[in-house]
Amino acid sequence: MVRLSNQEGLAEWLPRRLAEERPVITVIGDAILDGWWEGLIERFCREAPAPVVQVQRREYAPGGAANTAMNLAALGARVRFVSLVGEDDAGQRLRDRMADAGVDVSGVVSHPDMTTTTKFRVSSGGQVMLRLDDAAAEVPDAGLWGLAGAIPAAVAGAEAVVLCDYEAGTLDGPVRSALLAALGPEQQRNLLVVDAHHPARWAELRPDLATPNAMEAATLLGAEFPGGAARCPFVEAHAEQLLRASGAAAVVVTLDREGTLTLRSGESGNLPPHHRTWARPEAEKQASGAGDTFVAALTLARAAGLPLTTSVDLAQAAADVVVHRPGTSVCSTEELARHLGGFADTALSADELARQIEAHRREGQRIVLTNGCFDVLHRGHTRYLNQAKQLGDVLVVALNSDSSVRKLKGPDRPVNHEADRAAVIAALSCVDHVTVFDTPTPIPLIELLEPDVYAKGGDYTPEMLAETEAVERYGGTVTILDYVPEHSTTAVLERIRSTGDTPTD
């Protein structure tokens, strides 16, 4: 099991350490073969006003549940894949690609009357012109019975099971009965993750996690979701309904460009019931399967024993890697490590930060600034930073320099140098920019940036802060966020020194 100390966070070493765990993870669900055909358009056909695409490149990749399995293998898990395919070229190509990636496909059942689901996208100049879907009109009963027979061996000894139900019919009838018998709450099982178009269909399994997207969550609620920034408040307002309908101990709703929202029951002790991540979207590309990457990384992290909030943050980082690529792709251990390592040395100078803020303002974005030492990162910090992010569009975190931390906290602080603190803070999905300041207060930075909101955490009032006058002078707002005294850095360090224990989330 991976032990993650509070000061380490999403560090570059973490994906490699997770890969060393090599957990056995079984993925059961609907396999798809994704085809990406790219070509040139130079004329229209004579029969109809349709472009002629002269295909120049053909690429194939396992999709659907098979893509989840491929991502898990790329991140270091030992993966068993269970699905039903046809005895056709697509089925053989899919099995070969997965076996080449190290996935155990002995649980993949083939049947001559089954058609392997395929989705071929035809594109030109970076634009998808057409998608061709081919799927079985009816799933053969004999194939379902064969798949049902493969389930007990596939889940035996697995440290996690991911159930991917896209309603293609392969998890119906005897397969559903076998899954209920093998994975029911009365069974001795480990982690169960449900990634389904209709999570309520598997609620009686009482899964540990359900991962619906916005449309699937709306179906669970029987309600239409609002658009844009209103979606997260809507999900939060209906948290208990989503938990009840899915039967899950926790629900992670994926919201595309808005990131994710993790919901836990109010009975989760002193843990915050909700946790937000923010995506880092770029210009739209022909990307497919980022949700599969997210589920894979989330499952691997939880199977290795990481806290749920850390696991979700890591999964968001993995999804950010693949969403910027065309086609169906996976995030490997080394790619995720490089992505997290890329946040090192990312603290901006005041002048560069001012240029970035000016660009954000031209786009009509609302700027939030907060500051602090953020020496030993703990749940109080991440909760506070997530709250600060929700006050605007862009969150800037100003870190006290090492010398200023020593003046504030004493000669034995900081525990982590400013470059390390900046890298960990920058890796949080809620943080957009990080800078370091060396002045007694951030007032010079406030006067330079003129943020719309200056956020501060602690048992303050605005009147107690020296920064308030500078903020109000240009018309900004000072907001005081939650104070979590039991999770202060000082308390964490005192506990480590007195007991040697590492507090966990």
Image (cartoon, helix red, strand yellow):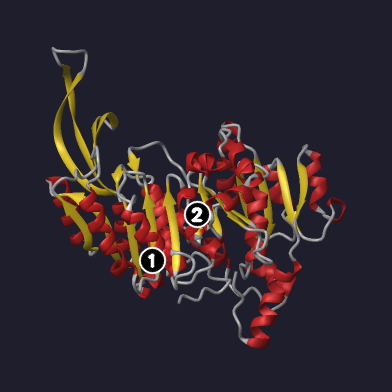
Mark 1 neighbour density, 10 Å: few (under 14) some (14–19) many (20 or more): some
Above/below status of 157 relative to 497: above
Q: Secondary structure at mark 2?
A: helix
Above/below status of 487 relative to 177: below
In this picture, residue 380 sits left or right of residue 247:
right
Q: Is any atom of residue 341 visible in this view?
A: no
Q: Secondary structure at mark 1?
A: helix
> Could you tell me residue 215's position as x and y percent?
48, 39
- Residue 476, by quadrant, is top right
Q: Is any atom of residue 241 visible in this view?
A: yes
Above/below status of 167 relative to 75: above
In this picture, residue 252 sits left or right of residue 135:
right
Q: Report the front residue among 333 and 298.
A: 298
Q: Return the residue at label 1.
A: 182
> Could you tell me residue 214's position as x and y percent?
50, 41
- In this view, the residue farthest toward the right is 463
Q: Return the residue at label 2.
A: 203
Q: At 57% across and 41% down in the image, what residue appears? A: 221
